[in-house]
Image (tube, rainbow, N blue to C red):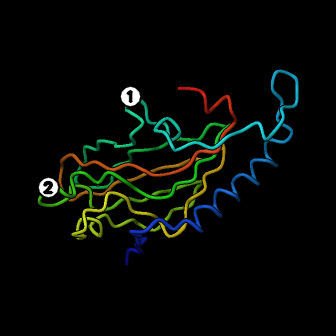
Amino acid sequence: MVEYLTLLKERPDNVINKAIKETIADAEVLWSPIEFEGYYPRGSGFGIAPLRPKDLGITGTTDRWEVTISSVSSATTYIDHTLDEDVYVVLEGIQDLTSFYTANKPVITAFQITASGDKLPVINLTEAFANDENIRRYYFKEPLIIKPKSGIKVDAYAPSTGTDYFGFIGTTVAKRAYLIQY
């Protein structure tokens, strides 16, 4: 029996804010003291920004986080990346399920995230397809915190070959030097 992770229509602000605060507390310990050109900076020495494709190793795309996926009929790995030592990622949910509202049926029916060696339950995208409210964002019950130098892998499942679109919603907590890179 496959265990599915239910997607939420409403943004769970309390749990997202809690996850970001926990990430900041961990970063303050991990990166303490942060030096910049030999001096101790005032403030934290790191910042918070919206998740960008490069944070998960995606290159050659805009930072809209809509990722085109060409799928095969079984599980295909689309992200297999180890985070930089200067960045945390808080995955909050998914967005831009464009083809779910323009196609007769989705190509990608589910995906599974493995982070830091822990496999999450399968995320059933057919839930989003079945929703008539044309919602463009769905949230995880609990955000997923991925620490520096930890791995993330995303496997997508599809019964047929085709193209689908989905992306991730999240927050990046990183050293300032990392955040200002394009």
Residue drawn at point x = 46 percent, y = 52 percent: 169
Secondary element at image label 2: loop
Query: In this view of the protein, can residue 149 be seen by the observer?
Result: no
Q: In terms of image quadrants, where is residue 59? A: top left
First of labels 1, 2 by sequence position: 1
Residue, disc 1: 60
What's the CA distance linking mark 1 and mark 2? 25 Å
Q: In terms of image quadrants, where is residue 109? A: bottom left
Query: In this view of the protein, can residue 6 be seen by the observer?
Result: yes
**In the picture shown, does residue 123 fall above or below 62?**
below
Residue, disc 2: 103
Task: Please state if 160 lies on the left or on the right of 120 as rendered.
Answer: left
Residue drawn at point x = 29 percent, y = 66 percent: 128
Identify which residue, 93 or 134, lies in the foreground.
134
Residue 71 image offset from top left, x and y in percent: 25, 48
Identify which residue, 95 or 14, lies in the foreground.
14
Tell me which amino acid carries mark 2.
Answer: Ala
Residue drawn at point x = 81 percent, y = 26 percent: 36
Secondary element at image label 1: loop
Task: Please state if 1 lies on the left or on the right of 54 as rendered.
Answer: left
Number of marks in the image? 2
Residue 1 image offset from top left, x and y in percent: 37, 78
Task: Please state if 148 lies on the left or on the right of 57 as rendered.
Answer: right
Q: Residues within 10 Å of mark 2 (few under 14, many from 20)?
A: few
Residue 111 image offset from top left, x and y in percent: 37, 59
